[in-house]
Image: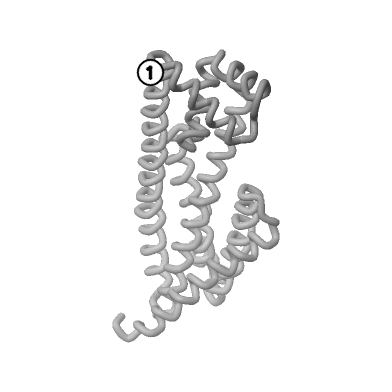
Amino acid sequence: MANKNSEVKISSYLSDFVYGGIDGSVTTFAIVAGVTGASLSPTIVLILGFANLFADGFSMAVGNYLSTKSRKEYADKVRKSEEHSVIHVPEEETQEIRDIFSEKGFSGQQLDDAVEIITSNQEVWVDTMMKDEFGIFEDHTSPIKSAIVTFISFNLIGFIPLLAYVLSYFYDSFRSETFTLSIILTSIAFFIVGSVKGQIVGKRWIFAGLEMLLIGGAAAVIAYVVGYLLRGLA
C-alpha cells in the first residue's frame, strides 16, 4: 500500500510539473512573440517575461494549492460521513454495497461473498463506497508540495523562451538572431513537455509532442500578430 501511494504521489507531482511547465512556456513565449511583433526592445521582453514568470507562476501555484486542498477537504468530509454511516446504520450501507456489486454483474453466492468480504473490513468498505457511490478517488498529494512543484516548473520551463535574450546581454553573437534562437529553444521545450504529458495521459509521445508544439506555436503566432498590429501605439 505504501509503495502504491508513493507511485500515486510521484505521478501527481509529475503532472503538476508538466502542466506548470506547459503554462509557463506558452505564456512566456507568447509575451516574447507579442513584444517582438510590436518591435519593442529586448529589455521589454525581459521585463514582461520575468514579471509573467513570477506573478503568473505564483497565481497558478496558489490556484493549484486551493484546488488540491478543496478536493482533499471534500474527500475527507465524505469519508467521515461514510464512516459514521457504516458504524451507525450498517444495514443500509450493506445494502448499498449489495446494490453496487449487483450492478457490476455479481449475483447469487458470488454476490453474497463479495458483500461479506467488503463489509468485513471497515476501511475497504468505506473506500468502496467513496469510489463506487461518489466517484471519489482520494488524492494523497500535499497541496503545498503541489503548489511548489507547479511554481518551480512554471519558472524553470517558462524561462526557456527568455534564455536567448538573457544570453544576448553577455554575448554579442546572440543579439542578431535572438528571436530565432528563442523560437528554436522554445519549440524543443514544447515538444519535450508535450511528449512527457503524452506519457502521463496515455497518448503516443510523438503525437502529444507535436500537438503541444502546434498549440504553443499558435499562441505565439496570435501574440505576434496582435503585437504587430498594435506596434504603432508603442
Q: Position of residue 196 (x, y in %)?
A: 63, 51
Q: Is residue 149 above or below residue 110?
A: below
Q: Is residue 217 left or right of residue 86?
A: right
Q: How many marks?
A: 1
For numbered disc 1, what is the local secondary structure?
Answer: helix
Q: Position of residue 189 (x, y in %)?
A: 59, 59
Q: Can I make out residue 139 in this image?
A: no
In the foreground, 7 or 48? 7
| Quadrant in which the C terminus appears | bottom left
Q: Is residue 82 above or below residue 175?
A: above
Q: Quadrant of residue 6?
A: top right
Q: Is residue 35 left or right of residue 182?
A: left
Residue at the far left: name it: 233
Residue matched to label 1 = 84
Q: Residue at x 47, y 56 (%)?
A: 24
Q: Quadrant of residue 38?
A: bottom left
